[in-house]
Image (cartoon, helix red, strand yellow):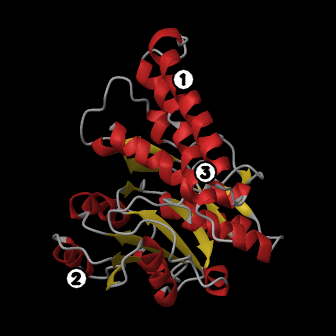
Amino acid sequence: MEGQLQLSIAICTFNRGDVLKLCLDSLKAQTVPNSEFEVIIVDNNSTDNTPQLVNEYVCEKDSPFIYVQEKKVGLSHARNHVIEIARSPYVAYLDDDAIAPKNWIEVALKIIEDEKPDAYGGPYKPFYLSPKPKWFLDRYVSYYPRDFAGNLGKQEYLPGNNMIIKKEHLVELKGFNPNLGMTGYKVAYSEETDFFDRLKKKRPSCRFWYEPDLCIKHLAPIRKMQWSWILKNRWAHGRDITPIYEGIKKTNSLGFMKRFLWILKMTLSSLIIAIFKRDKSRYPNWQNYLYEDTSHYLRRLGYLWVCFNKKQ
């Protein structure tokens, strides 16, 4: 299959020209010939220098880069646009602030040749462009479940910023739900979780593969280390992802109030422990306890809000 187009790589972007260049440079430096892959950059209504930046890559000789625009705002719309034009049997989705090592495509193609999975992906580790707070740990923005390759277990998942899917499955399921996922600057999730959940139900025999050598670096921006974003992130996870695993259980006003008061009580109790009673050998800073324990109650609150607002 050498020399044949084998992989379409989707980079969906919105006003990220400053970091998009790092991503495109990493894909430009791959060890495999350009004829074996294509990189489709989907501009989701950027107003910065993204079009001019990408044009420099598109215009290079024998360039694997393709630039398209998706006017419908939302990550799912941008991802679905790729399905319409991708020319290879597998579609990879990388975030626009990811950096792929030089052998990333080489590893990806080897997995296709050896395993022929229905979907697969790998871990990610952070990189920083600004100093991080002393309490902030790399594992807070990492995904590295294990150090050996193999089929995914029931509780394991493929990360949305480093996943590769057979195009036929994307076409069959009509891609990602446009009502889910990031929309402009709105924090929202679960479009890939929803997709894989639907795929498992539609095709129970599908194989999902994890490969630790398919590792990328993913930007940890300063905003993701600020409490305003962390709390918003927890709420959004509870609102968008938890219902997929637990279902949406309708609750009335009384039930909502009881559960809300319980969450408030547990949050305040956890806050007291974080400041005065935490295990300092495990949580050196009170922020570590808040991040790892207390903030998760906001996830439950996000889920509770969905249950309360469920229509009969």
Q: Quadrant of residue 138?
A: top left
x then y, percent, for residue 276: 47, 10
Q: Secondary structure at mark 3?
A: helix
Whether pointer 3 and pointer 2 mark residues with C-beta atoms closer than 8 Å, the reply is no
- Which numbered mark, 1 or 2, is in the foreground of this view? 1
Drawn side of residue 257 relative to residue 52, left or right: right
Q: Secondary structure at mark 1?
A: helix
Image point (59%, 28%), residue name: 266
Q: Nearer the viewer, residue 282 or 207?
A: 282
- Which numbered mark, 3 or 2, is in the foreground of this view? 3
- Which numbered mark, 3 or 1, is in the foreground of this view? 3
Q: Relative to 252, does residue 14 appear above or below in the rendering? A: below
Image point (42%, 56%), residue name: 100
The kind of residue on which mark 2 rests is Cys
Q: Nearer the viewer, residue 173 or 61?
A: 173
Residue 59 marker: 2
Q: Secondary structure at mark 2?
A: loop
The mark that comes first in sequence, 3 or 1, is: 1
Mark-to-mark CA distance, 3 and 1: 19 Å
Q: Name the residue beneath numbered marker 3.
A: 304
